[in-house]
Amino acid sequence: MDNNLRRRFENTIISTSGSDFHDFVSKLFIKRFGEDFVPVKQKRDRGCDGILENKKFLAIYGPSSQRRNLKEFILKSTEDFEKYKDKWEKKYQEWCFVYNDECTIDRIEHLKSLKPGVIIYDLKHLMNIIEELTFPKLRELANYLGIFIEYFRNDILKQIIEDLIKKPFEDIEYEINNPKDIDEKIKLNYDMKDFDLIRKKHETAFVDIEALKILLRAYDDTEISAMKMKVLNVFAKISGDFKEKMTKVNEILCDTYENDMYKYFIDVILLYLFEACIVGKKP
């Protein structure tokens, strides 16, 4: 996850308070732990905000920025712990405290004074859980928080580019020749019955291809060449017509990724290389 996307998540979590923070934590834990997490409705919780792995008792605290001081933290956490100790400790041995910001040393020391083995989920730990999610679940969580897909684009493209750079293949000569009309290039490389479909793919991906061009400015010529040559070497090892090769290359490059969003953005990279006349016949 790149720094911009991380900050977006962190700022959104910090600004989420009260019942909204409780709902967010429930959604996050369900996505990460599945059936191992049992949420508890707030009106019927009796001090319990959720049970994890049938042994961890969750107390969720999401104060607003105006109430995010040490005194309020001590009062609320002590009150939550007393409810846990009185009603739940015999059944659930582990007490977890979930907080919507960073737990400073004084806060950590207070929680440990209540229960030495306390498990703390503060902002840092919540972000670690978020980063463990598969992309579809991450995207769903982002939509829930109002974080738009644009924040993902650079993150995904950057990861794919750097994955391609890591294992460069042997050098292959290539020449960049930007065509004035992409239609001519499509006609040279595809069966005419596929023309409308391929043209539509380029139109749909136009904004993302332009974003890729901007992102590539952050890489030096050697790194960009390594990325391009890896793709070219994969092309060189595949038989079939150009459409079959494009499909197969996507499948090969997607082999280490688990979701459809990476497949789309690898397509964006292939479409960029096609438009730049790095792959395919040149008009």
Image (cartoon, grey):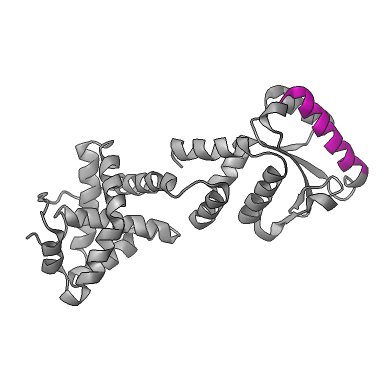
Is 20 within the magenta?
A: no
Q: Is residue 263 left or right of residue 32?
A: left
Query: In which image quadrant can residue 253 be found?
Result: bottom left
Residue 46, placed above or below residue 112: below
Is residue 244 at all visible to an observer of this figure? no
Q: Is residue 80 left or right of residue 105?
A: right
Q: Position of residue 26 (x, y in %)?
A: 68, 51
Image side of residue 271 versus residue 142, left or right = left
Image point 20% across, 51% down: which residue? 229
How many numbered markers are drawn? Answer: 0
Residue at 53% across / 47% down in the picture? 146
* Residue at the left extreme, as displayed: 283
Q: Nearer the viewer, residue 212 or 103?
A: 212
Main SS category, magenta section = helix
- Quarter that holds the C terminus: bottom left
* Residue 81 drawn in magenta: yes
Residue 14, x across and y down, in percent? 61, 35
Q: Looking at the image, which residue is at 30% across and 56% down?
A: 205
Residue drawn at x 11%, y 54% is: 179
Q: Of 211 and 78, which appears nearest the observer?
A: 211
Examine the rendering and report whether any part of residue 25 can be seen.
yes
Image x and y of residue 32, in percent: 61, 53
Q: Is residue 9 left or right of residue 161?
A: right
Give the magenta range. Answer: 69-86
Q: Quadrant of residue 260?
A: bottom left
Outermost residue toward the right in this view = 86
- Residue 261 drawn above or below residue 153: below
